[in-house]
Image (tube, rainbow, N blue to C red):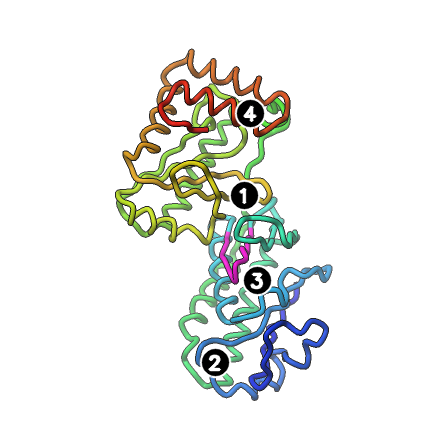
Amino acid sequence: MKYISFIQYPDKKIRRFPVGNELEYFFDISSSELSKIKEVRVGVRGYISLTDDKDNELLGHRLFGGIDSLWLELVESVEKLMHDGFGATIVQNCGLIMETYSKTLVKFYITSEEGAYKKPCRILSQKDFIDTILDGAKQFFCRLKEHLKTNQYDEDLLKIDELLRKAENFQPIDPYFHYPNETTRVNTFLFQHNEDWREMFEKERAYLMKLITETDYEIQHVGSTAINTLSARPVIDILIGTKSKWSTEMIVNDIHRDYFYQETSFPVNACKKGTPPDCQYNIYVTEKNSPFWNSVITFRDKLLTDEDLAKEYDELKRKASACGDLQDYENQKSAFIERNDPLKLA
């Protein structure tokens, strides 16, 4: 893998990126042209060229802007990747996502905030990817520190050095997302219940808890994957209960970099996580004991304790999904739940 930090000449002003004419406006930070930078007040403008071993572009001028901030966002995401197998951030209305895709591979992609694909790439080595990002960030900040004779970047460099030491003993991480075995597929949408779904919930619950700065909240596993007698789509529904509207807003702000915003007809804040265009987690945030919270929890608990209701619901789900029409499937689920719950919840 290769990286180059390109810095904008301070005397060259541009509104749009000059595609095809980059060298007139940008220089490699490792060159002597860095002497043209006399000071840094509000950041360094430029872009990162990041390519894999086959010269496929991972990053380029699309994220032209504050290059110092971009390197720090990448370092923070790599730290999450090293620990959890997944790291994400939002830069200039784009999501930068990195996830362990196999025991050796990393999948890296750029998306819109809504989660649509823009740039998927597979990197053959998790460790090479991690080392490249950390080395690139260190080179960038070391060059600025030495040239400007400043201690402005000391704290950032300390963090990068710490991660580089950890990377020396890094062991590859299993894939972050788990996909059901095809032998358990019921039809186009549904799979038989999978015990991995409980583990996936617990893992994501731990991930959320590291992001959330509030102290009084509750995280519940809801939806069909929480019921071991139901077939389900392999999407884990997670409900976060808060103490107040203000607390809800704080939690949504805490997690918005790692999850895509999701429109919903429910009276809640909703987001999703997964490999676009699919998702493997739906996250709903609402106040504890709100009508939505009470209805979802009550319906889940009914299914857990009422075998006849669970059997009837599973039969409906299998029949409704057999035709392969997702919207019709969702509509039939909604009608069933409405008959068994005061709110129209799908």
- The secondary element bearing badge 2 is classed as helix
Specify start and end residues of the magenta stretch as a single range.
87-98
Amino acid beneath label 4: Tyr
Q: Main secondary structure of the magenta part?
A: strand
Q: Nearer the viewer, mark 3 or mark 2?
A: 2
Residue picked out by circle 3: 131
Amino acid beneath label 2: Lys
- The secondary element bearing badge 3 is classed as helix
Q: Residue at x 58, y 31 (%)?
A: 180
Amino acid beneath label 1: Gly
Q: Nearer the viewer, mark 1 or mark 3?
A: 1
- Asked if 118 appears above or below 22 in the picture, the reply is above
Residue picked out by circle 1: 274
Cα distance, mark 1 to mark 4? 21 Å
Residue picked out by circle 2: 145
Q: Nearer the viewer, mark 1 or mark 4?
A: 4
Cα distance, mark 1 to mark 3? 24 Å
- Earlier in the chain: of badge 2 and badge 4, it is 2
Is 243 left, or right, of 50 in this rendering?
A: left
Q: Residues within 10 Å of mark 1 (few under 14, many from 20)?
A: some
Residue picked out by circle 4: 329
Cα distance, mark 4 to mark 3? 46 Å
